[in-house]
Amino acid sequence: MALHSVAIMQPTYLPWLGYFDLIDQSDCFVFLDSVQFSKRSWQQRNRVKGPGNKSFWLTVPVQSKGRRNQDINEVTIDDTKSLEELHVQTITHFYRKAPYFSSYIDELKAILCRPYRLLVELNIDLITWLCTQIGIGGEMILSSSLNCDGTNVQRLVSICKKLEADRYISAPGSRDYIGDDELFLLNDIELTYHSYYHPEYRQFQGSFVPYLSTLDLLFNEGPAALDIIRKGRCGLTSNFNISSNDI
């Protein structure tokens, strides 16, 4: 009988390929929106490729003054700055000559130009849209809807139990605070780690630059995006001594 797998990640802005491979391998993907927001992290920014093989940051401006300890699901976007001007124009300038740019830009622009109040809503709409374009399905849920408290590891186990999972797929960067798998074992949950090696793909100009937003893959490879994402998959492992880029 196949294991029911859950993966849990913070909702990040226009994530990289490995994020979508993690979604693709899980039966249920949980957006961890009920933990503290980290300013100038992947939660509010990511990179795209520009001229000269350089990567450029796209950063969503947020309200942070006097809100030091806010959770991810409380972070509001600074609406005094237009994402259409900040991001749509930059993306268009960098990618207008990419093979599949015209296939996706109108829908992407429509999302980026909506009057979002919360960062989490923008991020999840973009992730959901990217999953649809790539061809990734599966259940998605907010951690805040599950009312699971506790320390880092206790919270993860509680979420898995509430979703009746018997396998947890963790990002490799979580190894430091998870430690051993004792708490998972006590609750009959198999702890595995997502191992991913960034695949190369065609970029319409210059030499290959890895670890960009998945937008770069979509604009350059279009319908081939899912097959390319899956090429980087190294399987799941319980071994702590694995090497992987944690983005």
Image (cartoon, rainbow, N blue to C red):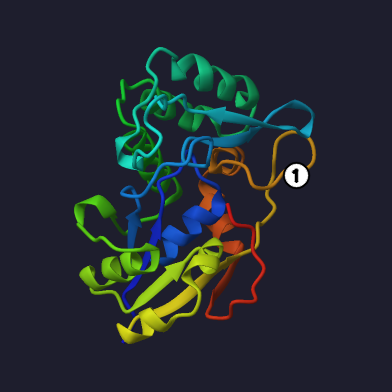
Q: Position of residue 88 (x, y in %)?
A: 50, 21
Residue 235 or 161: which is nearer the viewer? 161
Answer yes or no: is residue 68 visible: yes
- What residue lies at 55% left-to-right and 65% top-to-bottom? 172
Counting labels gives 1
- What residue lies at 30% left-to-right and 40% top-to-bottom? 73
Residue 119 or 99: which is nearer the viewer? 119
Residue 214 or 33: which is nearer the viewer? 33
> Which amino acid, by three-letter code, is at mark 1?
Phe
The answer to whether residue 244 is left or right of residue 238 is: right
Q: Position of residue 66 (x, y in %)?
A: 38, 26
Q: Which residue is mark 1?
A: 208
Q: Position of residue 120 (x, y in %)?
A: 34, 38
- What residue lies at 24% left-to-right and 61% top-to-bottom? 148
Q: Position of residue 206 (x, y in %)?
A: 79, 35
- What residue lies at 30% left-to-right and 82% top-to-bottom? 187
53 over 15 or under it: above or below:
above
